[in-house]
Image: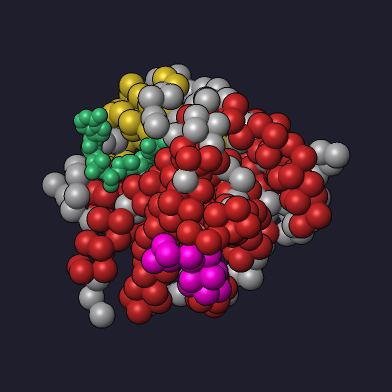
Amino acid sequence: MNIALPIGHVDTNRIETITTQTLAPMVRDIDAGQYPEGVMRAYGAAGAYGSHITGETGVMDAIIAMSRAGEVCTSTAFCMWCQDALAWYIYSSDNDFLKSTIGPRVASGEILGGTGLSNPMKAVNGIEPMRLKAERVDGGYRVKGVLPWVSNLSEGGYFGIIFDAPVPRSDAVKKVMAVAFADWDGVKLKLDHDFVAMGGTATCQVMFKDAFIPDDYILADPAEDFIKRIRGGFVLMQCGMASGMVQSCIDLMEQVRGPLGHVNCYLEKQPEDFAADLTDLMAEITDLARTPYEPSNAYFRRVLTARLKGGEMAVESAHYAMLHCGARGYVSQGAAQRRLREAYFVAIVTPATKQLRKMLADLPA
Ligand SMILES: Cc1cc2nc3c(=O)[nH]c(=O)nc-3n(C[C@H](O)[C@H](O)[C@H](O)COP(=O)(O)OP(=O)(O)OC[C@H]3O[C@@H](n4cnc5c(N)ncnc54)[C@H](O)[C@@H]3O)c2cc1C
């Protein structure tokens, strides 16, 4: 079952089987903190993390696979995004070493990993200071600092980072982007489960104590232009978490139409309202996914707007799923309350709703 497909091919039948037969029965365990490693590897073998790296056209396939998982479990969908983001960084760079060594193994799910970019994403938008700083040494950089949360990460994993480093012979500071390995000397992981949902995301605090990052693992130095290159795909792919959430909330509302429709019809929002909005959102995402490297601010503004809309729809649809389901959604095993807790993650993960609004306010036309 886990035989990997050639990179660039997604087997949608296999994605469907993994989702319904393996993932769906274990969502409560994931909610309680179990990391779905077997599912993540199986999705990788089915091509879920390889479509977006072979050119510009596969981004939508990655989003659709993530969305299908997200209909059942946002923790898993987020872990897929982490994996997609790591592959996206490697294959968007000029680093042939990474593209030929760990790249194919990330794309197939053989290596699992993620991205520690929420701090630098906030830093470049003037929200918080950079947490990782480095000095230049022979053959690489020595990095220190702490990233509070990096998901889809355990021993043997890789993850994208950005750190501040001095510009040689100057007082200026530049950003450098690299792939880090969890098992390097000076890198330490500490698992963090202390969330209201998303417990199964293998989210770690990562400490760098003078960890050496070899030049072979540098994605961009300086990284400012590279960040612009990857930003569209990074943000756009998160829409898969949102669309999966909205679709599942529509389904929950439909499921109780029979027994509760006579009174649910008085609620302000009905499943068909969310279905219409989701159709519009998917059309916009599909269009944007055709040109993820488009550098213009106008394009990035559309991406940010779609992502903002997705986060807001995720929360609103989960809120209405809870109202439609009533007490059957409010019990400890109820799907609606789990979806509601998960939905807020879509709106608070970087770029969070407030950051998206700031970025849209700051971005030149
Ligand atoms: C389950 C989960 C998984 C995540 N996975 C990743 C990942 O893979 N990669 C990644 O880069 N980021 C990850 N994050 C971080 C996430 O993307 C956001 O950056 C984070 O949720 C905060 O975003 P915000 O913009 O709302 O900032 P805010 O919450 O508004 O502010 C963040 C600031 O508050 C501080 N802070 C946080 N918690 C507390 C607290 N309990 N008390 C006091 N101060 C606090 C932080 O140090 C930070 O400076 C994850 C977060 C969660 C909850």
The residue under the point 68% across, 38% down is 23
Residue 10 lies in what quarter of the image? bottom right
Q: 324 or 106: nearer the eye?
A: 324
Q: Pick out the residue farthest to the left.
A: 171
Q: Position of residue 113 (x, y in %)?
A: 55, 37
Which quadrant would the C terminus be assigned to in this image?
Answer: bottom left
Position of 21 compared to 58: left or right? right
Q: Which residues are magenta?
A: 265-279
Task: Reply yes or no: does residue 27 show up in magenta.
Answer: no
Position of 238 compared to 28: left or right? left
The residue under the point 25% across, 63% down is 357
The residue under the point 68% across, 51% down is 48
Q: Position of residue 107 (x, y in %)?
A: 66, 47
Residue 304 sits above or below residue 2 on the image: below
Which quadrant would the N terminus be assigned to in this image?
Answer: top right
Q: 140 or 360: nearer the eye?
A: 360
Q: How many marks?
A: 0
Q: Position of residue 324 (x, y in %)?
A: 48, 53
Q: Where ligand 1 lies, by image quadrant?
A: top left
The residue under the point 63% across, 57% down is 258
Q: Is residue 350 visible?
A: no
Q: Position of residue 194 (x, y in %)?
A: 38, 25
- Colouring: secondary structure
Position of 258 compared to 136: left or right? right
Q: Pick out the residue farthest to the front.
A: 262
Q: Is residue 365 visible?
A: yes
Residue 234 sits above or below residue 206 on the image: below
Main secondary structure found in the magenta portion? helix
